[in-house]
Amino acid sequence: MIHAGMKIDLQKLPFALKPFLLSLFLSLSFSAFLFFQTPPHSLHKPALLPPDLRIRPGFSSYDAYINRQLNKTLNPKLRKIWTTRDWDRKVRVFSEFFDNLKLRGFLSNDSKALCVGARVGQEVAALKRVGVNDSIGIDLVPYPPLVIKGDFHHQSFDDRSFDLEFSNVFDHALYPWKFVGEIERTLKPGGICVLHVSLSRRADKYSANDLYSVDPLKELFKVSELVEVRRIDGFGLDTEVVFRKKMNK
């Protein structure tokens, strides 16, 4: 028996045993490699997901999930539509949404804002149009200068970076608990998170989860309070949910 701490002199081992030990070493090394390649967010799955939130099956790995999202984000026809035909209309509608947030006291010109899953940055352009100039978006594919490359499951920003975070892609989160956790981590105390979600109908084939009520969001936001829920007409999304991060968090 080989005990922990014992040194093994390969020169003194029987020749037949050397390939076995080499194979064992390589196997353990590969296992360690896979462990550290596993996205850290997948290790923090809640013991039990809220019943009104369901993760869609069919993703064999995190890379498979990312590739599925990229199939949409990099689709040349969609990107052309987003940056041409859809651009003015969506920037105008998002501007109305953000103006309304300003009227309700959730947003100001001095806010530092992040748009999570911003694709080509229509939301960011709208924020700048209404006077919130310190704003940026993140997405798997950058679209300078409005959108930088980023994974919303693991934001690259420091803790307490933003006064407001907006997203209309909650349904694209494979790990909704991590999606929300990263928003709460990077929000300043008292900061606002605004989500546009769909409760009345299922989202498109690129979605990774289905949400059936606001209750799961209230469970996922651990250090924030629900401020407001209202009906909207937001490009297929029907509900706006506003959370405020607690001041002592």
Image: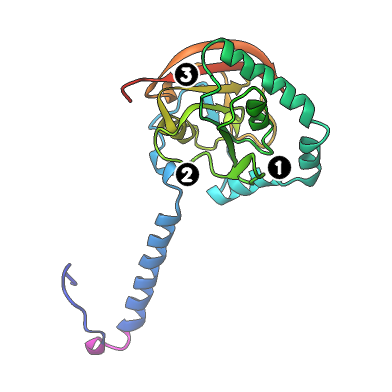
Residue 123 against residue 57 in the figure, above or below: above
Looking at this view, is 90 or 77 the one in front?
Answer: 90
Mark 1 nearby-residue class (10 Å; few <14, some 14–19, many ≥20): some
What residue appears at the point 26 percent right and 85 percent down from the top-left corner? Answer: 10
Q: Tell me if label 3 and label 2 are in contact, CB under 8 Å.
A: no
Where is residue 241 drawn, in percent x and y? Answer: 54, 17
**Residue linked to disc 2:** 156
Span highlighted in magenta in the image = 11-16
What residue appears at the point 67 percent right and 37 percent down from the top-left corner? Answer: 206
Looking at this view, is 238 or 141 the one in front?
Answer: 141
Where is residue 153 drawn, in percent x and y? Answer: 50, 40
Q: Amino acid at mark 3?
A: Phe
**Residue linked to disc 3:** 243
Relative placement, left or right, of 71 versus 223 is right
Mark 3 nearby-residue class (10 Å; few <14, some 14–19, many ≥20): many
Q: Amino acid at mark 1?
A: Lys
